Every structure is written in C-alpha cells, then in structure tokens.
C-alpha cells in the first residue's frame, strides 16, 4: 500500500493555496487560514491542495462552531471537495432526523447521506472518503463516472455512489480524472486538522 501524503500536519500550510470563488481564480498565495493548537480555522478564501490525486483514500477531520442563532445553510457551513469538483457538505446537522442532499455528509445537491452520523458543535469529526476517479475521453467527456464511498465518524453514509456530475463552486467546474482537496470558506469558522491522502492507483 502506498504511503499517505500529508497535507496538513498541524503546523505547515505550505501544501495549500488560496482560492477566491468570487472571481473563480487562485489568490496566487499560499493558504492563509490561522493555525492554532494543531488546527486551521476558516477565515477568508477557500483553500486547495497543490497535490492532486486520482483513485484515493482521503481523510479530513473537522470541528463545527457553535452557532445557536443560525439556521439551515448558515449553521457551521463549509465543504470538502474531492478532486476539487465533488462537494461533501459540512454543516451542523446534528439535530436533523432525516438528512437531505444539503445536510452534513451529503454529496451536495446529488445524494443525501444514508444515515445522520453528524456530531454536535465542538466535537472533532472525521470523513474517510474512497474515490474511484472518473475516466474521460480525449475530448473531456465522461467515459466512466466517478464512484465514491464515504464514512463519517466511522459510519458509512455513501456506499459505492456513482457520481452523475460535478458540483458547483469548486476549483474545477467540470469532472476531472485527478484533482486536489478543496476546503470551502462559507463564512463560518469551521476548523480542520489531520488532512491526508493515500493514493490507491
């Protein structure tokens, strides 16, 4: 098995670059989120990894802020984009009985999680994502769709889910064969730690 590629070890943000979704372009600078106590917290701009991967196991831990007055998509919102084009929603959905395709763990706008495995604010949570990359024709059209299996806090929430398309607001506006880890700035102070990728191709 190939060694994992460490993207954030609690200290060094050099593996990440900033991205401004308002203008749909990189900022031209390294990641700028503050590092404290081994974690990074969303401030301004999205971030994406310099490292791109195809088939892989992606591990990301996150911690939701306590936002008792906020509701819906304003409550601890962020996103983990696999290949920079498939968003797995991050949101405080801990009190939701039946999650939909916009709650925590959803493939945003595509598929609801099989179960609500979301913990409450202030608790560290973990995504383990297994992606089999899409295969493209020479003209960029999709020959084989990507397939994803996702665990949230040790519970399976997507099982061999075929992805019909990319999702909006990532670093890529199309399906790709290789891409980065992309973390979204949605104006909520979500924290992240222990980010790594293990190539499987």
Image (cartoon, rainbow, N blue to C red):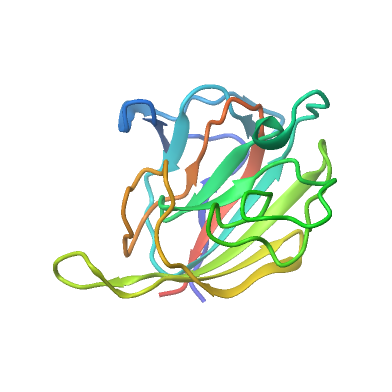
Residue 161 vertical position relative to residue 69 in the rendered view, above or below: below
Q: Quadrant of residue 8?
A: top right
> Left or right: 91 with respect to 186?
right
Pick whichever, 36 or 164, lies toward us: 164
> How many numbered marks appear?
0
The residue sitting at 39% across, 31% down in the picture is 21
Which image quadrant is residue 178 in?
bottom left
Q: Tell me what residue is drawn at x 64 percent, y 39 percent.
A: 192
| Image location of residue 163, percent across then percent down | 46, 67
Q: Determine the residue positioned at 47% across, 49% down.
A: 181
Q: From where the camera sits, is residue 93 visible?
A: yes
Looking at the rendered image, the quarter that the C terminus falls into is: bottom left
* Percent x, y of residue 49: 42, 44
Q: Identify which residue, 33 or 6, lies in the foreground.
A: 33
| Relative horizontal placement of residue 96, taking residue 180 as reference (left or right) | right
* Rendered location of residue 94, percent (x, y): 82, 46
Residue at the outermost left position: 139
Tell me if I can see residue 15 in this picture.
no
* Place of residue 60 in the rendered image (x, y in percent of width and height, measured from the top left): 62, 51
Q: Please, is residue 1 above or below residue 17 in the view?
A: below
Q: Is residue 96 above or below residue 33?
A: below
Relative to 156, does residue 125 appear above or below in the rendering?
A: above
Q: Residue at x 84, y 42 (%)?
A: 120
């Amino acid at each position: 098995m190939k060694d994992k590629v460490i993207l954030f070890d609690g200290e060094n943000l050099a593996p990440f670059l900033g991205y401004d979704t308002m203008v749909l372009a990189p900022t031209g600078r390294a990641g700028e989120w503050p590092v404290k106590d081994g974690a990074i917290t969303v401030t301004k701009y999205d971030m994406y990894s310099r490292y791109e991967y195809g088939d892989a196991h992606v591990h990301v831990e996150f911690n939701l802020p306590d936002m008792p007055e906020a509701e819906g998509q304003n409550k601890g919102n962020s996103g983990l984009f696999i290949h920079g084009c498939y968003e797995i929603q991050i949101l405080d959905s801990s009190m939701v009985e039946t999650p939909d395709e916009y709650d925590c763990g959803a493939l945003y706008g595509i598929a609801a999680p099989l179960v609500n495995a979301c913990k409450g604010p202030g608790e560290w949570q973990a995504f383990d994502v297994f992606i089999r990359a899409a295969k493209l024709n020479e003209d960029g059209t999709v020959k084989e769709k990507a397939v994803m299996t996702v665990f949230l806090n040790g519970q399976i929430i997507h099982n061999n889910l075929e992805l019909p398309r990319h999702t909006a607001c990532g670093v890529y506006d199309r399906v790709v064969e290789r891409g980065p880890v992309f973390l979204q700035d949605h104006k909520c102070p979500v924290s992240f730690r222990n980010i790594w990728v293990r190539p499987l191709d």
